[in-house]
Amino acid sequence: MTRLKTDDIEHIKSSLDIYDRQLKQRTGRTLLGTACHAAGVDEDAIIERTQGYAIHVVPITGGLGIISDFSETVSGILDYLGFNAAVAPATDVTGVAHAFESGAHAVMMADDHRFVAIDLYTRQVVDNSEATGRVFAAALELMADESQQTNALILGCGPVGEAAARYLRTMDYSLCLYDIRPEPARALKERLEKEIPDRPIRIETDLAYALTQTPLVIEATPAAEAIPDHLITDHLRVSAPGVPLGVTPNGELRLKDRLVHDKLELGVAAMAVSLLANSTSR
């Protein structure tokens, strides 16, 4: 999990309406709608249940400590989506205990290694890396023209890229994998081919060539210029869960409405919807 900085998230709560409108313009779905699409659930059915599903965000002080406003921002996103969300009044173990004692249905919490959502009734655990990869892949699918919905390029074969690849694989996409280190790409190819053997997967070592052949891209790297400006074409569509964004400001202008990127919003939405979709509690 990439450790966010305060300046990565300080404007998220105040910009949710703008972000939601932009996302709908680019994908045809709102933040909640995109998360529901990623989970394969009916948005109206989820909307009916959000307010009755209480999620407590528990600040964790271990490791490098609390990121300023992180818990408040997560709670703000959940509240915007319609969930009954609150920041726990205490940190760490005391905060988790309070969630149980107050009858919360779920907790969300993050340390230096994982950001997870846990349903306190079903014991389901949703990891942010998996949820983020899946929902950004769903956003890419929604952005794609019908003629493009066959092939996708995964840049970065870590946990987020793997989750995106797995989602697209289940949607019958053929995949191209690219990583600056060959071993993660090879290992991911082997895992995916064992799970779903009937769709081709290729490993590409030439990024420029891969981008000319595959216009749908998941940018799941930690590199600031993973997609150089000169490789951005008019047909490219990029869904970018990577932090920092692997496209330059000039590249963002060139992509315009063919780019989906955020630091926290889609991942949090996907985590919450996944919990609620599989919850048996009210």
Image (cartoon, helix red, strand yellow):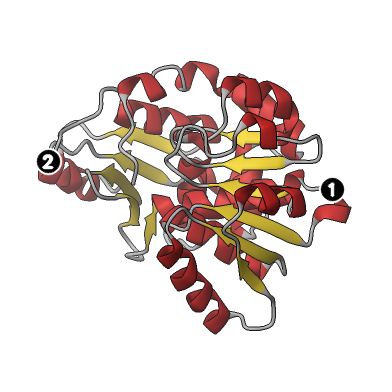
Q: Note whether 232 is above or below 273 in the view shown.
A: above
In this view, 146 is above or below 260: below
The reply, left or right, for residue 94 in relation to residue 109 is: left
Task: Tell me residue 83's x, y (percent).
Answer: 47, 39
| Residue depicted at 40% across the width and 50% down the height | 128
- Asked whether residue 189 appears in the rendered view, the answer is yes
- Does any portion of residue 45 appear in the rendered image? no
Q: Quadrant of the C terminus?
A: bottom left
Residue 148 higher or lower than 68, as above or below: below
Which residue is painted at 62% across and 42% down in the image?
A: 239
Nearest the eye: 163 or 24: 163
Image coords of residue 84 (percent x, y): 43, 37
Which of the numbered marks, if any, corresponds to residue 145? 1
Question: Residue 135 location, x and y as percent?
Answer: 57, 50
Distance from the alpha carbon under mark 1 to that under mark 2: 45 Å
Q: Residue at 63% x, 20% y: name it.
A: 250
Q: Is residue 172 above or below residue 57?
A: below
Which mark lies nearer to you, 1 or 2? 1
Q: Amino acid at mark 1?
A: Asp
Residue type indicated by callout 2 = Gly
Instruction: State the image coordinates of residue 223 (x, y, percent, origin top left).
Output: 45, 38
Q: Residues within 10 Å of mark 1 (few under 14, many from 20)?
A: few
Secondary structure of residue under mark 2? loop
* Mark sitting on residue 216: none
Identify the residue position indicated by label 2 in the image. 62
Q: In which quadrant of the rendered view does residue 172 lie?
A: bottom right
Nearest to the observer: residue 119 or residue 168: 168
